[in-house]
């Protein structure tokens, strides 16, 4: 069996759920799932309970990561309507600043554009600024980036109109980068009956087949593949008011490797978007002696259960994939092998040195 060696993957969009909702996930289980999926580093989103919005909540989240993370990590700061110079000064300690500009799950939605000016103006130019901005709101976010002459990164682009807006901005030389998730590349509204109404809830919502086709047709515009790993308990997803989000850390690589086998992208496309460009956009240090060994010929069907994520479910149940993670080495030590996570909690390192 000839194994394929890849650099350690980096996921810039992960919801760890700690503090505040550890029955869904915590730093230990999220990073175990990451290693099982071939990711040796994750960047954690700030919409926890309480949200990470200031020095106190940032330090609390980082302390939890120091104690529990099994792979390397960095933590985002979330912008609020009261964002100011004190919060901007935290940039070197963070993965970046996240702006929730469209309605989403959690308390961080910046409803009025009046509250956008301070984050766009005060956050350091060299520090990543990530926006959740859908459809028309994306056009407004691109205008703000142009107004303040600063780079932005657009999270989870999902629809044809969005990828075309970003294409237009890039063609005009605007400093915008973007990411696409596996669920928007491989699922559409037509999959909802199979997944189930509650379990199919996600933000942005699943698009139409023509939206998915537009993402593939404009793949050269996409800088990064990110999972938007957003675990919830099955009981919540099956409830009358299901929260939006899917687990994704353990299924992203096999889905994308299958696309490589089918000729829909190249292996270099995958490595660029899951390692090299992530490091470049977020200015991350190199992880020495770090790699992922994959069996590219392994064919398997995605199961309903048996995952390392505490959520232990997936919207991709029953999909046939090719490519399985066999071994992960982080800084010269085997941290995952043949289904077993070997890295102990607390062995991960901060990518920002704090």
Image (tube, helix red, strand yellow):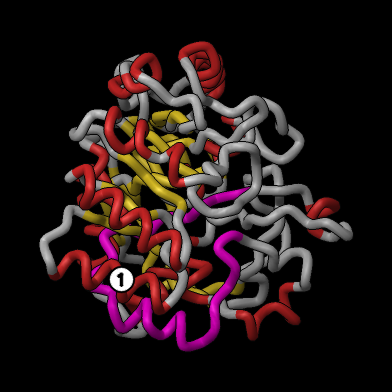
Q: Please determine whether, in this image, residue 306 is positioned above or below residue 350.
A: below
Residue 286 visible to the viewer: no
Residue 270 visible to the viewer: yes
As drawn, the residue found furthest toward the front would be: 114
Decide which of 348, 42 is in the foreground and name it: 42
- Left or right of 230 on screen, residue 323: left
Decide which of 158, 135 is in the foreground and name it: 135
Decide which of 7, 217 is in the foreground and name it: 217
Q: SS at mark 1?
A: helix
| Position of residue 66 measured from the top left corner of the image (x, y, whole percent) | 48, 17
As drawn, the residue found furthest toward the right would be: 240
Could you tell me which residue is drawn at 62 percent across and 57 percent down? 246
Q: Residues within 10 Å of mark 1 (few under 14, many from 20)?
A: some
Could you tell me which residue is drawn at 29 percent across and 28 percent down? 122
Decide which of 257, 276 is in the foreground and name it: 276
301 part of magenta stretch: no
Highlighted range, magenta: 203-230
224 part of magenta stretch: yes
Could you tell me which residue is drawn at 67 percent across and 66 percent down? 303
- Left or right of 344 on screen, residue 214: left
As drawn, the residue found furthest toward the left would be: 173
Q: Which residue, given by chain and number where applicable, does mark 1 sit on?
A: 165
Residue 207 found in image quarter: bottom right
| Position of residue 306 measured from the top left corner of the image (x, y, whole percent) | 69, 54
């Amino acid at each position: 069996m000839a194994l394929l060696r890849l650099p350690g993957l980096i996921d810039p969009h992960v919801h760890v759920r700690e503090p505040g909702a550890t029955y869904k996930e915590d730093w230990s289980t999220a990073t175990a799932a990451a290693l099982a999926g071939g990711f040796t580093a994750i960047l954690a989103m700030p919409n926890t309970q309480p949200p990470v919005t200031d020095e106190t909540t940032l330090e609390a989240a980082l302390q939890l990561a120091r104690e529990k993370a099994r792979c390397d990590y960095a933590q985002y700061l979330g912008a609020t309507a009261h964002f100011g110079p004190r919060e901007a000064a935290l940039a070197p300690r963070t993965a970046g600043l996240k702006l929730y500009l469209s309605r989403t799950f959690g308390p961080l939605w910046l409803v009025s554009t009046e509250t956008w000016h301070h984050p766009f103006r005060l956050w350091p130019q060299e520090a990543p600024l990530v926006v959740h901005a859908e459809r028309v709101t994306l056009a407004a976010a691109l205008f703000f980036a142009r107004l303040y002459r600063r780079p932005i990164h657009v999270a989870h682009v999902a629809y044809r109109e969005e990828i075309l807006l970003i294409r237009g901005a890039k063609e005009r030389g605007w400093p915008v980068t973007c990411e696409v998730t596996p669920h928007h590349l491989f699922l559409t509204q037509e999959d909802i009956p199979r997944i189930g109404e509650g379990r199919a809830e996600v933000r942005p919502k699943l698009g139409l087949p023509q939206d998915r086709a537009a993402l593939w047709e404009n793949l050269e515009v996409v800088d990064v593949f990110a999972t938007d790993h957003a675990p919830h308990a099955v009981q919540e997803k099956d409830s009358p008011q299901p929260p939006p989000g899917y687990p994704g850390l353990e299924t992203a690589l096999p889905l994308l490797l299958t696309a490589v086998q089918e000729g829909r992208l190249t292996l270099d496309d995958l490595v660029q978007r899951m390692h090299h460009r992530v490091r470049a956009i977020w200015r991350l240090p190199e992880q020495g002696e770090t790699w992922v060994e994959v069996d590219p010929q392994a064919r398997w069907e995605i199961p309903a259960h048996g995952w390392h994520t505490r959520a232990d479910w997936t919207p991709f149940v029953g999909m046939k994939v090719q490519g399985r993670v066999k071994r992960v080495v982080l800084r010269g030590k085997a941290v995952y092998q043949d289904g077993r996570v070997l890295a102990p909690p607390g062995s991960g390192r901060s990518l920002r040195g704090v």
